[in-house]
Amino acid sequence: MLRFIAVLLALCCTIGSAYAQDSGLSNAARRAPYYDGLKGKKVVFVPLSMGFDLTEGWAAVMRRQAADLGYTLEIRDPNWSTDAGTRALTSLIAQKPDLVIVHNPDVQSYARPIKRLEQAGIKVLQVNLESALTTDSYVGADWVKVGYVEADALVKKCGPGTSGKIAIMQGVPTAASNLYELYAYHDTFAKHPNIKIVSEQAANYDPAKARAIMETVLQQNPDLCGVVGNWDNQDVGAGAAIQQAGKTGQVYVVTSGGGTQDGCENIRKGLIDMTVSYNVPLQGDILNQQIVELLLSPAKAGAVKNTYYTPLTILTKDNLTPRNCWSLGELK
């Protein structure tokens, strides 16, 4: 009799287990901490400015995830003003968001308010342009590597048999991208005596200024071989001056950028020959991953220092595809 009862109980358990599996599993033990841990959290993005491809692209990708996961994403737009950006960061110390995402105008200006944010227990994620201060995370290009890739391309184009003359088109002289790229440029060119730097000037992200600089450089150096620049939105101005002088194809223009359709179109038009793309949509995805990790992590602000260098893609006329060239509408 006891054996019969034991068999009956085992049979009931087996049937119950099978029924539970047929009904599916909620996975509540894994899902609940994830969604509940993110819901209601506050994230603030302080860009250089909104209204251009990089920041609009990152914001579009970040907004999608915030809406999906139930945390808020606010944008404090300083509109290219470092003073306004410093005030925005300082005001956040008292407002206590869970995470601040910072796009630094240069390596020093935001270091002090960023430090104060961390001291107040607020985590800081830097995107694509670093401060001298290392924070919880940096997501963006490895600018030294970008500089080496650009410089190597010019060395190959402007080797023996050419004038070897090149121009360096800086962005903002104190920005991380500019400083780290310059190191790579000079380190590379110093190893190639045939390369002659005939101009090294800053266009400060302004295509009109880049065009004016290049017009003068071409007048002084009609046999110029190549130009290496900081950002495609700026360096398209240099390309326009080269095109106006009838030297398209003679002066090789190398730059970097986020891989937008407009940037790709400038390559198709011959205004730029090569762009080292750091792929804004992919950066947005990695930013989202880091946002989740930082919001869910029990670690205190400043306790962990992460760096995520995003992959680089070399864009030329030969490989322009929808995958490499994105539009803002596709990200929204």
Image: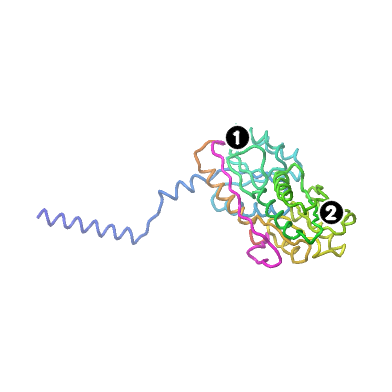
Numbered disc in front, either 2 or 1: 2
Question: Is residue 45 among the parts visible in the rendering?
Answer: yes
Question: Is residue 93 among the parts visible in the rendering?
Answer: no
> What's the residue type where badge 2 is placed?
Ala
Give residue 284's mark: none
Disc 1 residue crowd, few under 14, some 14–19, many 20+, Cα 10 Å:
many
Q: Earlier in the sequence, mark 2 or mark 1?
A: 1
Residue corresponding to mark 1: 118
Disc 2 residue crowd, few under 14, some 14–19, many 20+, Cα 10 Å:
some
Q: Quadrant of residue 81?
A: top right
How many marks overall? 2
Q: Indicate the position of residue 111 as horizontal and vertical percent values.
A: 67, 36
Which of 291 and 209 lies nearest the eye of the viewer?
209
Element type at mark 2: helix
User: Which residues make up the magenta segment?
Assistant: 301-328
Q: Indicate the position of residue 19 as horizontal and vertical percent values.
A: 30, 60
Element type at mark 1: helix
The quadrant of the picture occupied by the N terminus is bottom left
Give residue 208's mark: 2
> What's the residue type where badge 1 is placed?
Glu
The quadrant of the picture occupied by the C terminus is bottom right
